Amino acid sequence: MKIIIHGGFFSESSTDAETKKAKQDALVSIVKQSYEYLKTHSALQTVAYAVSLLENDALFNAGIGSQIQSDGNIRMSASIMDGVSKKMSGVINIENVKNPILVAEKLLEVDDRILGGEGATDFARKNGFEYFSTEIPQRREEYLAKLKSNRTGTVGCVALDKNGKIAVATSTGGKGFEIVGRISDSATVAGNFANEICGVSCTGVGEDIVSGAVAAKIVTRVTDGFSLKDAFAKTFNELKPFDGFAGAIAIDKDGSIYHQDSHPKMVFASFDGKNTKVFE
């Protein structure tokens, strides 16, 4: 059993030592909680659980840490994919729910598995997800001050369970101040992809990740015989011509874990039951 999570890029927020330590501690706590959950649950159930914990922590740009768009509203996106069934489901620009990833998980049960905007929100309400404002004072202050720094945060998880099954989940609160209707990578195969061989979750600038088809390329290359390291190297080299801003985490069927970013520094933590690794 293996698990790795990410919480976006550290450069999206304050670079002070206190914030860095808070993110490290939060990631270590969440990855260990999620590993315990993985002991008695499938990889698919675990990635949804892990990402929901990340959505519940305002340190990260998803769920209650989500950014505010140009019209003053919060819209979130998330997706989940089962490496065994190859089913992917997701929500795009959903509003006023606490955990978009859990709505995405619920969509695995229906035929129309990727919903956007009002349709995603309506589906959530009809399936028991109550109204919940994810806006926090910090994000409103940032919006009112019209901050212009990069907003490249996303959260994600890849898990390999005791039966050798892989699943992946990704969730984002957007980049902040985006045009209403903008689509992130998080609910696409560029940002979140898995099969029985490998799973990948991405973070960074959504447009760059989509242009590079990052997650799908890495998984395809590993499936075709590349090592994780070589698949990452080739895919990230293909981002260089347009200075693509991306980070990714992965686990393959053999339990190998890998991560890479094109611009420092993606925040992540992994755990295998004995050893914890966290960004420094």
Image (tube, rainbow, N blue to C red):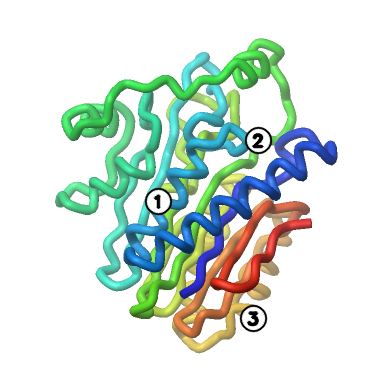
Q: Nearer the viewer, residue 156 or 179?
A: 156
The C terminus appears in which quarter of the rendering? bottom right
Q: Count of labels shown? A: 3
Mark 2 element type? loop
- Residue named by callout 3: 230
Q: Which mark is residue 151?
A: 2
Q: Position of residue 44 (x, y in %)?
A: 34, 61
Q: Position of residue 123 (x, y in %)?
A: 21, 33
Please tell me how crowded label 1 is: few (under 14), some (14-19), or many (20+) other residues with Cα within 10 Å. Answer: many
The mark closer to the camera, 1 or 2, is 1
The mark nearer the N terminus, 2 or 3, is 2
Determine the CA span between mark 2 and mark 3: 29 Å
The mark closer to the camera, 3 or 1, is 1
Task: Indicate the amino acid at tag 1.
Answer: Tyr
Please tell me how crowded label 2 is: few (under 14), some (14-19), or many (20+) other residues with Cα within 10 Å. Answer: many
Looking at the image, the residue that sits furthest to the top is 144
Determine the CA span between mark 1 and mark 2: 24 Å
- Residue named by callout 1: 49
The mark nearer the N terminus, 3 or 1, is 1
Determine the CA span between mark 3 and mark 1: 30 Å
Task: Indicate the amino acid at tag 3.
Answer: Asp
Residue 145 drawn above or below residue 240: above
Q: Position of residue 240 (x, y in %)?
A: 73, 61
Instruction: State left or right for residue 85 relative to residue 264.
Output: left
Mark 1 element type? helix
Residue 134 drawn above or below residue 91: above
Q: Position of residue 228 (x, y in %)?
A: 59, 79
Q: Residue at x 50, y 88 (%)?
A: 225
